[in-house]
Amino acid sequence: MEITLSPIGRLETPFNDIADMPIQTSVLADTCGKAVLDEKFAPGLKDLDGFSHIILLFLLHKISGYQLEVVPFMDTLPHGIFATRSPKRPNRIGMSIVRMESVVGNIVQFKGVDMLNGSPLLDIKPYYSYFDQQTQVRNGWLEGKTLRPENLRSDKRFES
Amino acid sequence: MEITLSPIGRLETPFNDIADMPIQTSVLADTCGKAVLDEKFAPGLKDLDGFSHIILLFLLHKISGYQLEVVPFMDTLPHGIFATRSPKRPNRIGMSIVRMESVVGNIVQFKGVDMLNGSPLLDIKPYYSYFDQQTQVRNGWLEGKTLRPENLRSDKRFES
């Protein structure tokens, strides 16, 4: 079974290379990005501006192939790809929760950039605390990691 | 530009019809579901069992076509599709955060089911509180809604 999707637009960010990119949308990161939708989808953004956070789904377009075990940036040991947020996944869909700044026409400005410039945008969903802010969370191998992800930058390990 | 994806497996749930399905993975819902991966992907599940919550990305396979404005279950007014979690989106990708129960071989058992039986599974990501548990959240039009989503069931409005 093959599934065919079409991007609804693309992400504009300051990062053109995988190397040296932030590995997450740190709450400290004030770097701005834009989701530029095809103009025909602009009416779908109505009322998005009331939300403080949005979920971006996008294609990790510079990744090719997958690895079922990877050593992620946050550890020195290998973990199953589905137990990590690493990009070398069978379906290379990235998901980032970012802080929304504004919606003007077909353009959504946001803060917290951990995606490559030109990434094809697949979907925007509102972050809703009742659904998405889970409590009593156990973080598996990430629990108690003292690495601060906002200080980490991507290296070349996941370049295709 | 067309993007081609292949499912990594499928979701098994008690819900075969859109009508009467829960509209979200309520924290009260103890209904069990299974993510059944193709066996070749089983090694990618290593260490997932340490996480209490996982993010499922799947195809909303019974939805066809999209609407740029919808009246979602949580309101009586229309909102832009990207300001809702409604299924009639340009790329019909569903995202649910569910409680993980167990990982055995290629099968992940979880609780909190709001997806149709047979939904093609696209990705599993670990829920990581540092990335996903956002604070100081404003919920836009959903703020202060007194409807309790765990009491709502789907109707036929999004059937194709």
Image (tube, coloured by chain):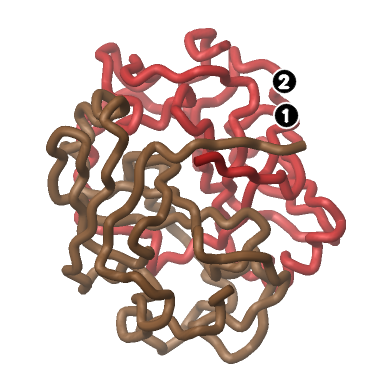
Chain colours: A red, B brown
Q: Is residue A128 left or right of residue A84?
A: right
Q: Which residue is drawn at 35% across and 26% down?
A: A81
Chain under label 2?
A: A
- Quadrant housing residue A84: top left
Say above or below: A35 vs A124: above
Q: Residue visible at 37% across and 64% down?
A: B115
Q: Where is residue B147 in the image (x, y as percent from the top left)?
A: 41, 88
Pointers 2 and 1 within a single chain:
yes
Tell me, for residue A117, which label it has, or none: 1
Residue A57 at what x, y percent from top left? 57, 45
Q: Compare marks 2 and 1 and give the one earlier in the sequence.
A: 2
For residue A16, the mark is: 2
| Residue lying furthest top | A156
Quarter of the C terminus of chain A within the rendering: top right
- Of helix, strand and loop, which one carries label 2? loop
Which SS class for mark 1?
Answer: loop
Q: Mark 1 lies on which chain?
A: A
Relative horizontal placement of residue B84, taking residue B32 as reference (left or right): right
Question: Which residue occupies 62% across, 65% down?
Answer: B64
Task: Give how far across and how far down residue B159 sits, in percent.
Answer: 54, 76
| Left or right, A108 with reference to B107 | right
Give the residue displayed 25% in from the left and 68% down from the top. Answer: B14
